[in-house]
Image (cartoon, rainbow, N blue to C red):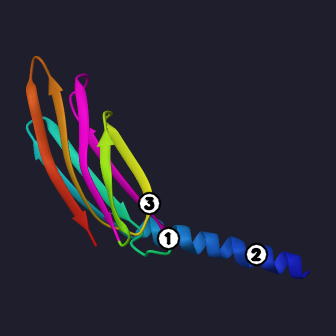
Amino acid sequence: MKKGIVAGVFALAVVVTLAVTGSAARTVTKYNGPVTFNSTLSAPSPNYTTFYTSRITSPGGGSYKHSGTLYTSSGSKEIAGSSALYTNSTPGISMAVNTMSWYTSSMGTYSATTTVEW
């Protein structure tokens, strides 16, 4: 019986953690021409893994770039990505500064910097 209670308490803790993580989020969206630049930061507590996601929504094709810095209580970490979606899960992210850009030879370059923080 004790095993079932322990398993139940653990499962409840996981559900509560996911609920807190899922509901706690900061989002910053910027637009430049036909492109949308979106950054989301969730779960600010240093005890939880913090999820940072940035997405470039464009007319399609071309090249993508994410660059910047994730700041945590224990230092900083570089943001570097070359696809439409960038994700990072690091404990205790308090701020993300991300310059995102999209380029095609026919349309040129569109970029924006998003800063999302707790």
What residue sits right under mark 3 in the picture? 90
Q: Is residue 68 left or right of residue 47?
A: left
Give SS at disc 1.
loop
Task: Say if mark 3 contacts mark 2, CB within 8 Å.
Answer: no
| Quarter holding residue 100 | top left
Quadrant location of the N terminus? bottom right
Q: Amino acid at mark 2?
A: Gly
User: Magenta span has 64?
Assistant: yes
Horizontal relation, residue 39 to residue 102: left or right: right
> Which structural element holds mark 2?
helix
Which residue position holds label 1?
48
Q: Which residues are magenta?
A: 49-72
Name the residue rendered at 18%, 54% in the picture: 114
Q: Residue at x 87, y 76 (%)?
A: 3
> Which residue has dot 2 on it?
8
In terms of image quadrants, where is residue 17? Answer: bottom right
Reply above or below: 27 against 100: below
Mark 1 vs mark 3, CA separation in Å? 9 Å
Q: Earlier in the sequence, mark 1 or mark 2?
A: 2
Q: Nearer the viewer, residue 117 or 27?
A: 117
Q: Is residue 90 above or below residue 94?
A: above
Q: Determine whether, in the image, residue 64 is placed left or right of residue 22.
A: left
How far separated are the C-alphas under marks 3 and 2? Answer: 27 Å
